Image: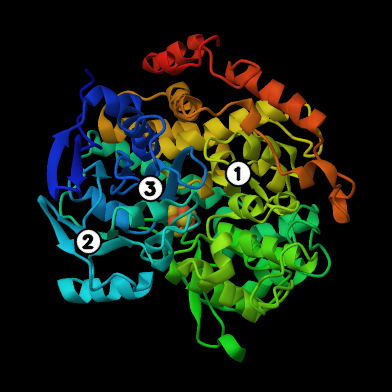
Amino acid sequence: MKNFAGGWFGKLLRINLTDRTSRVEEIDHTVLYKFVGGAALGAKLLYDEVSPGTDPLGPENKLIYAVGPITGTDAPCASRLNLTTKSPLTGTLANSLSGGFFPVEMKWTGLDAIIIEGKAAEPVYVLVRDNKVEIKSAVKYWGLNTQDTQTYLKEDLDDHNIRISCIGPAGENLSLISCIINECRALGRKGVGAVMGSKNLKAIAVRGTKKVPIANQKKFKEIIKEFLKYLGESELVYPVFSKTGSSLAVGATSALGFFPAKNWQDTGVEDLAPHLDSNVFAQYGQTRNRCYRCPVACSQVRMAKTGRYAGISTEGPEYETIYSLGSVLGIKDPAFIIAADRLCDELGLDTISAGVAVGMAMELYERGIFTATDGLELKFGNQEATLTFLRMMAYKEGFAKIFADGTKRAGQAIGNGAGYYAMEVKGLELPAYDVRGAKAHGVNYATAYTGADHNRGYASQEVFGIPIPYPVERLEIKGKGVLAKWNQDFCGCYDVATLCEFPAQMGLMPVAQKLTADLLSGATGCEFTEQGVWQLGERLNNLCRMFNVREGFSRKDDCLPRRLMEEPIKDGLSKGEMISQQDLDFMLDEYYEARGWDKNGIPSAAKLQELGIEDTIKDLPSGS
Ligand code: SF4
């Protein structure tokens, strides 16, 4: 049993919607120490409490909101939470990240985690105000979009500072590409909104007044000072990233020829990217937002000032959305992307999956494979058709219903070779890095425990040329399995610390682990080392892999879309590049070996023992 003197409250709130009960439980200190932070604690709870084969949309699945020991403290960039559940889109463990202010408010209620289980008989929302927990009717809010839900709930509760996490129509209608919105932030990807909808849960509202105890205030303050100093010295963080947000990546990926366009048929280097880069979006700038206690304030609030979308604003669009609602659809109008981003947030649709689903539908339409669109001209570049289609997916209307559960299922439902045009891994639509020109991204997409997820192993070496842990040749396949493992564990460290990854990717990489270890030590009073933090990241990745192994996942699922393995990139600096099955096999072998997994991608008992998750050994497939 480890004791701690700060950081955690050591408590979780369990809410059962079926019988409308709630209770606060102590969390074993050893569990907190071994599975530090929102992602790891959530994964551990899900592993222990959700049996293999559970229907992700059934009452037995759980929604686990979890924060970390430095969430809600004065540490910069630490306002994060992880939502963990079993994904209805992929069947894997799903883990979504969000910043903003909801995470700190949740922490200030005195909780490290909230577990929602069961299913309410009618729409409800959960209200947590410090120690008081209420399950209240949400019948009057059901059907509202995410922004109206928040506005009316705040009004009805007469509390404009209460923080709300909610779903829109897409989650209510169980679209498997729906998300959860916290204020303007998304807990996105993997259909987590549908899990909330399946429980008849419209929203969670939190308000807390408890101060997070800090074990060693003096040390903690010194580390914060050091953190701020490194942020100030970075050539990227304040001079560039603060002003552009993630849209800065458009220039980088298009210059290198791996910014995907038109459902990944093109790179958009010449005709699209110049209209979509950060300088262009800067002209739509209104103001900047920040997560709690973040000096970087990277969130750009953009507004369309003239034309048909005049007056529509959004927090974003982020790089991934510029791709999914812009280049993937052959659209180069920033005002449209602002409007479509706003619409997706209101409907509670994940922008990446929704945009990629529209892109697939457009390609199928143009190729004559799927034309039963009730007269909707689904051609690349058609803005009006896109907005209509997005709305139809959220409500699962007409032909759009086929795409509302993601591209993999759409391909299966349509047949006639349509699956070839589904840009997904394990059912999760691809983010905005064409892996044919960035091979470590390719290994990450193939192996990340959530499906194609850039946040689980971002290769900033290939995008920004950051030479850590060593300089990288992005088109080389040798070494990319090892690098992907390094990146996934690096990202895992951030997930366990529940720290925002952006500053680390923008220049703090050399000191990131040390700062993380020191912050965790200062807050909790437990001793964390740089090496120990690395192990936390590795443990997280192995535990999540074991969740998937227990569900039947293995090497056969670590794949890439056929298009990327058969069609070379057509133009730009990555022209001629692809990842053949042979290339992928080579990188997977290297990756599995670096991980201590067998050739089938199954962790070895020795590795699980080494990482202290020996209780998962019983779930290894027989013969491995
Ligand atoms: S860098 Fe951006 S996303 Fe990260 S904590 Fe700061 S404002 Fe939030």
At label 1, counting other C-alpha atoms closer than 10 Å, the crowd grade (few under 14, some 14-19, many 20 or more) is many
At label 3, which amino acid type do we have?
Answer: Leu
At label 2, which amino acid type do we have?
Answer: Glu
Tell me, for residue 57, which label it has, or none: 3
Circle nearer the N terminus (1, 2): 2
Residue displayed at 76% across by 52% down? 258
Residue displayed at 62% across by 67% down? 325
Where on the picture, by quarter, is residue 559?
A: top right
In x, y percent, where is residue 271?
Answer: 82, 70
In front of the other: 286 or 512? 286
Between label 1 and label 2, give the one nearer the viewer: 2
In front of the other: 20 or 457? 20
At label 2, counting other C-alpha atoms closer than 10 Å, the crowd grade (few under 14, some 14-19, many 20 or more) is some
**Residue pointed to by mark 1:** 452
Where on the picture, by quarter, is residue 42?
A: top left
Q: Is residue 232 above or below residue 607?
A: below
In front of the other: 496 or 354? 354
Q: Secondary structure at mark 2?
A: loop
Q: Is residue 370 left or right of residue 457?
A: right
Residue displayed at 30% across by 71% down? 149
Q: Secondary structure at mark 3?
A: loop
